[in-house]
Amino acid sequence: MSVNNGTRPTVASFFSGIGGFDLGFQRARFKVTFQCEIDSFCNQILQKHWPDIPRAKNMREITNANVPLSDVWVGGFPCQDVSLARMAPRPGLKGKQSRLFHEFARLIGEGRPRVFLIENVPGLRSSHGGRDFQIIIQTLAELGYGVGWRVLNSKYFGVPQSRQRIYIVGCYRDGRGPAEILFESERRTRNDEKNGSDGKEAVSPFKKVVGNSRKGPVTPALAYCLYACSARHTGTDWSRNYVSYPDGRVRRYLAVECERIQGFPDNWTLPSDPPDDADKLDSLRYQTLGNAVTVNVAEWLARRITRYLLKPGTANAAVHLNGTAHTNGAAGPLNGAAQSIASARSLRNLGWGRLEGSPGKR
Ligand SMILES: C[S@@+](CC[C@H](N)C(=O)[O-])C[C@H]1O[C@@H](n2cnc3c(N)ncnc32)[C@H](O)[C@@H]1O
């Protein structure tokens, strides 16, 4: 583990997409060591922003030997099979895409990173009546991890988008770590009394608009959750997010506006060598931005993880089985030496799941 000896902590990214996790962690001073992404457009974007790091294509084909030693592993496996946005019945964890969770779990079992962070849609909790979620938590706990989760909404992290996602954190041989990372003991009260989604004065933010409808375009002050969709999509997803003009015309958000409400810099998803077909390019940008992690949320979690790694007693407890158990600097006992490996049952008893939370309005 590198945090305490002045060097940057490291993060390896899986199902990297356009690098939402990677950028958030980088903003929190992490060095990105590795990426794995199968989609060719995403790979162009990753190559543009991280030209010099090793990158693999298929989760099914890599082993831990491909992954450089890293303090933290992050990844959001594909969510289509568990998402409530799906019109058809959800195949759940057995679906072709979501089955990839097991590939990530296999790698975690081989590599045993100190901390892992997984992102997915909140529907993960209810797929197959909760059985899929139980399998996920149990699988990770059986690998030796204390596991916790929390649903966070991007709107509390400085972007104008209501986007709820579940974040699952695992800490190797540490049953308390996930709660320390995910929940702020420094919060004064559980919920803000006056406003917020569960406050007394909660008002639908979608009713508020920005702009003057007589003089120019108006747009909702807070966007609905962005979904992956094409530039020609006319369904219910994107059409909820629109800008309307005084003469009655409406338009969907531009790709650059989607970048902004996901916390990316402008033109992040513009490849170095863009295709000639503008519609095709827009579709690729909407699609990948709809799939991405909000960068601000990733950054907040990265800072919480750094704090956890720096805590006395944990900072040198790097465990990475790239062939051998590994420690840097003054090797101490594993943080969990005095604590038992959390089992799925003990996790349930600890009751660390939480449905929704915010770190306060920011
Ligand atoms: C939910 S998205 C993750 C988005 C990412 N967190 C971001 O911020 O952009 C899931 C990603 O997994 C990728 N993926 C699907 N199958 C894969 C595989 N077998 N190996 C590697 N990546 C895969 C998809 O192309 C997609 O970009």
Image: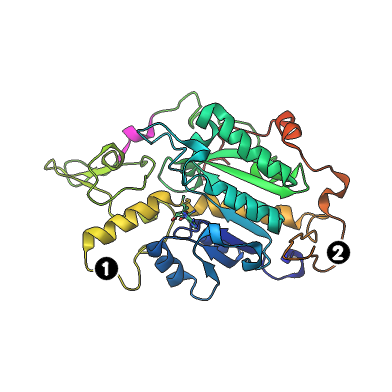
Judged left or right of residue 270, residue 107 is right
The answer to if 261 sits in the magenta stretch is no
Is the residue 236 above or below the residue 292 in the image?
A: above
State which quadrant residue 84 falls in: top left
Q: Which residues are magenta?
A: 204-209
- Looking at the rendered structure, the kind of residue marked 1 is Pro
Closer to us: 241 or 192? 241
Residue 113 visible in this rendered orientation of the protein:
no
Label 2 SS = loop
Percent x, y of residue 106? 64, 52
Tell me how the rendering is colored. Answer: rainbow
Q: Residue at x 62, y 33 (%)?
A: 134
Label 1 SS = loop
Closer to us: 5 or 228? 228
* Extreme residue in the bottom direction: 52
Is the residue 18 above or below the residue 91 in the image?
A: below
Q: Residue at x 82, y 48 (%)?
A: 336
Mark 1 surroundings: few (<14), some (14-19) or many (≥20) residues within 10 A? few
Whether disc 2's CB lies below 8 Å from ligand 1 is answered no
Mark 2 surroundings: few (<14), some (14-19) or many (≥20) residues within 10 A? few
Q: Which residue in the structure is indicated by mark 1?
A: 275
Is the residue 241 above or below the residue 351 in the image?
A: below
Earlier residue among tags 2 and 1: 1
Is the residue 326 above or below the residue 353 in the image?
A: below
Judged left or right of residue 83, residue 75 is right
Q: Which residue in the structure is indicated by mark 2?
A: 331
Q: Residue at x 44, y 34 (%)?
A: 90
Residue 263 visible in this rendered orientation of the protein:
yes
The answer to if 207 sits in the magenta stretch is yes
- Looking at the rendered structure, the kind of residue marked 2 is Ala
